[in-house]
């Protein structure tokens, strides 16, 4: 009896997590407004300049996420992606690409902060910091540029270089390059995943995403 209870409890926990992710994605995926960019004529899921979260010596599959740091759906998928990339870091290339949506006050500001950090070799650290703290600054009506600058300082970045990069039109253009590719690939909201060049429905749980990866690896 006790064994059956524990199995049932574990199953319920898995289903609860999956339901929570699915609920967050359906309720909070960022789809409002139109991105102010033209679709790339030569849209590519991954470019040489794209930010890779894993870079295996022999990659068997590529998973690209077009994301908005203020999107709660992206925030719900963040721990799922973290778990998967740790599990498949030697086989799968995970790529993060910017797709700030106009419905969020600080999504563009966040993307600029992350790209400015990337210029000093701290892309992943700022990427993680913004998702880890999303509940503290997300959905705010006022600018959170100062908050992001504080995170940059905490990461030990050269603040003069950081401020210069945030204000540099080339940083904005780098973000728009991702947006244009996303639009050219049919991205309309976030999170959107592209697996080996094909846009897929966003998985509702870790298990669903893992099965999709396993299927891709088995081909």
Image (cartoon, rainbow, N blue to C red):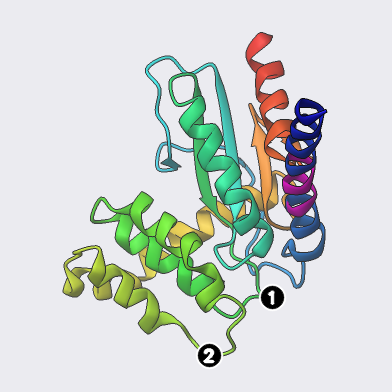
Whether residue 78 is situated above or below residue 203 in the rendered picture = below
Residue, x 67% and y 9% (percent of image)? 218
Q: CA distance from mark 2 to mark 1?
A: 13 Å
Q: Quadrant of residue 174?
A: bottom left
Residue, x 64% and y 69% (percent of image)? 36
Magenta region, residue range: 14-20
Q: Nearer the viewer, residue 207 or 185?
A: 207
Residue 46 visible, this orientation? no
Q: With 113 as the anchor, is 190 left or right in this view?
A: right
Q: First in sequence: mark 2 or mark 1?
A: 1
The residue indicated by pointer 1 is 103
Disc 1 element: loop
Residue, x 59% and y 61% (percent of image)? 68
Q: Position of residue 67 (x, y in %)?
A: 59, 55
The residue indicated by pointer 2 is 142
Q: Nearer the viewer, residue 104 or 40?
A: 104
Q: Position of residue 186 (x, y in %)?
A: 75, 47
Q: Position of residue 129 (x, y in %)?
A: 40, 61
Of badges 2 and 1, nearer the viewer stands 2
């Amino acid at each position: 009896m006790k064994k059956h209870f524990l199995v049932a409890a574990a199953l319920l926990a898995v289903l609860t997590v999956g339901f929570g992710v699915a609920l967050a994605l359906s309720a909070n995926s960022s789809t409002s407004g139109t991105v102010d960019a033209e679709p790339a004529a030569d849209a590519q899921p991954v470019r040489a300049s794209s930010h890779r979260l894993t870079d295996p010596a022999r990659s068997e599959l590529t998973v690209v996420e077009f994301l908005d740091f203020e999107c709660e759906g992206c925030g719900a998928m963040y721990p799922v992606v973290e778990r998967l990339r740790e599990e498949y870091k030697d086989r799968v290339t995970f790529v993060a690409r910017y797709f700030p949506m106009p419905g969020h006050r600080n999504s563009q500001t966040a993307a600029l902060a992350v790209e400015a950090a990337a210029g000093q070799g701290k892309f992943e650290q700022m990427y993680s910091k913004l998702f880890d703290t999303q509940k503290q600054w997300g959905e705010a009506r006022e600018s959170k540029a100062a908050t992001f600058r504080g995170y940059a300082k905490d990461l030990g970045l050269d603040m003069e270089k950081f401020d210069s990069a945030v204000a540099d039109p080339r940083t904005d253009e780098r973000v728009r390059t991702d947006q244009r590719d996303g639009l050219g690939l049919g991205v309309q909201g976030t999170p959107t995943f592209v697996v080996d060049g094909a846009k897929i429905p966003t998985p509702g749980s870790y298990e669903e995403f893992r099965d999709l990866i396993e299927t891709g690896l088995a081909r």
